[in-house]
Image (cartoon, rainbow, N blue to C red):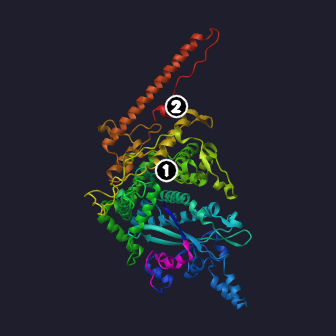
Amino acid sequence: MTVDIRIVRAGQMYRYYLRETVVGDGRRPARTPLRAAQEQAGVPVGRWMGRGLAVLGLAPGEEVTEAQLRNLFGERGRHPYADRIEADRLAAGASPTEAYRAGALGRRVTVTGVDFVFRPQPSIYLLWAFGDEETRLVIEAAHERAIVRVLEWIEDEVAVIRYGKDGVYRVRPPGGLVAARFRHYEARSGRPLLHDHVLLSVKGQRLDGKWGSIHTTALHENTVAASALYNELVASEVCEELGLATEPRTVTEGRRTVMEIAGVPHELIRWTARRSDQIATCLSELEHEYVTAVDDYGEPRFLPVVSERARAKLNTIAARKTRPPKKGKTRSLAQLRADWKASAIRTSGVPADVITSLLAYARAAAAAIRARVAAVVDIALAAVDVTAIVFVMNNGGRFHRRHLLAEARRHLALVLRGRRRDPGLDDQVVAAAISAHCLDISEPTTVRGLEAGYRLYTARWSLSDFPARRRSPAFAPDPDRRPPADSGEPLAPRPPGQDAGEWEIPRIPLQYDRAVLAGEVVRAQLRTTTVVRGRAYDVVAHQQAAMPEQLLAPEPDDPEHDDQEPKAGRGEAIDLTALRALRKSRTDVEALDLTADRLRRLQEVATQMADDARARADRVLADRTAAQADADAVAPDDQQAHRPQQPGPHRGREAGH
């Protein structure tokens, strides 16, 4: 995810945020004013945002002061101008207790806020780091506007104030929320990482004017949907403003793809992933210790396989163990960008001309993709994909609306490839999924369970209808298998040349592959049995929009006539000229890096599919001819028998697509 969430408590504001976070994750010198420390660290000042600022006498974009942060987040939820309010009340003759209460926002709380961390995909902040000044400003503006949109969605759809006994009453904060945003430029490893810390106050005002606290559990539950919305908004605005496009890339085998800017080399993304490599190495060692751990009697302490839940906990431990110290000397953004470019040219393995002209390479890749991949969104088919994936991957087939919403936003980002979409299209996909493919299995025992966001759903299918999950060879069940007892000797060193993660640690296979297969099965069933809007499902355009680019670019049969333009046809309008120019430019785009072997293999597959389609068409025609002959044999002479139409051009896989 590109949006993380952490709880902010009153003590943490003094121990961590006021000392480090507000100055770019550096070390704030003692007794240094906040503004001076931020200037020394080379980071911009914090800014207020949110619809609830007017009630507190603040304005959007206004500078965040240390006293305001201390009052709102450090003093258990007081007014940002509590010191001034208290002084005015004392001057008016109020008692100290009355003056203190005048500066409070309702009851005192321990959890004073949440810290949302927003960061774009690596390919976007690499363009931000290596591009010119105009590119940097465009990406930062898109980043800021996406944060504002996500915060508005949280205010309108997510945030609720609980009050009454056991929080039985829940209401949206009508005046909105208050947040402080702080910009950071680099990661702990020193690599570029554009990201913002948004400290969201839990204080909100109800309709009756009283102050209550936002339910932080609802914020945690909707973080994935917020992350998907942020990714979609940032990518679409950056692509539209700079003429770029996105492409799906596989980061971890068996998991969902991520959408990156096409044309940004993988080596550059790996260059920024120093922390990921360190975590992966430590995680492999922790997994080995996990599956071989035994108690005092020589019995295994844990399961002999690493489940997804155990792996997530081990990953958290690995991240903490490998966390580097804070950065040393501070540098300005201009100096940082110059140093990043020099370091990437020296150590990333990417040619210098690619790094210095990264935006031009990304635009060339976008031109090839947009000329060949049409953005077609079929809401009915999108609902099938979304429901199938959520059904397989959530709690044994039980899920809430927020799960569908997050998956719908990911699906739209995959299909649209960086193009902007109409507002509310994700809600339309979710509504179609719930109405057509979901069953409401809610048995609410509380008022909360009656709310639309907490209705419990399952799909109208059975898990037995879907293909079995592929099992990993390392997960072959062996009832006699036991981890070796700990002899007290240190673990054997890793063989030379063996990378992290290559040990044969038995892991439970991932579910995403099965979820994708489930969507394919359901689409196949609907294509053959269901008619929607008076027509059968036609999935050609939809699948082509989300298909990897290498499946859409056939190699010319005759290399001598490679300069000839292909004949334009339905589903075959491929700009091979742009593709050849892109390949000559040495742009490292996985989806467009077409080797001769891959093209021959794809051509063989396409030929086989066409032969199969023709064979099926011949069989259908033969069956119809036989049926017509039988009908002619029994038809009366004075009555013309019904003659079916001859098969003509039609859409679908049977047409050779």
Residue ranking furthest to the top: 637
Picture quadrant where residue 162 is located: bottom right
Q: Which residue is drawn at the image coordinates 42% and 73% (left, top)?
A: 333
Q: Which residue is drawn at the image coordinates 39% and 55% (left, top)?
A: 263
Q: Can see residue 269?
A: no
> Camera-side residue: 84 or 396?
396
Marks 2/1: CA–CA distance? 27 Å
**Left-right relation of 54 to 494:** right
Identify residue type, mark 1: Leu
Q: Position of residue 7 (x, y in %)?
A: 54, 69
Q: Is residue 374 above or below residue 301?
A: above
Q: Can see residue 377?
A: yes
Q: Is residue 24 magenta?
A: yes
The residue singled out by tag 1 in the image is 414
Q: Which residues are magenta?
A: 8-29
Q: Which of marks 1 and 2 precedes in the sequence?
A: 1
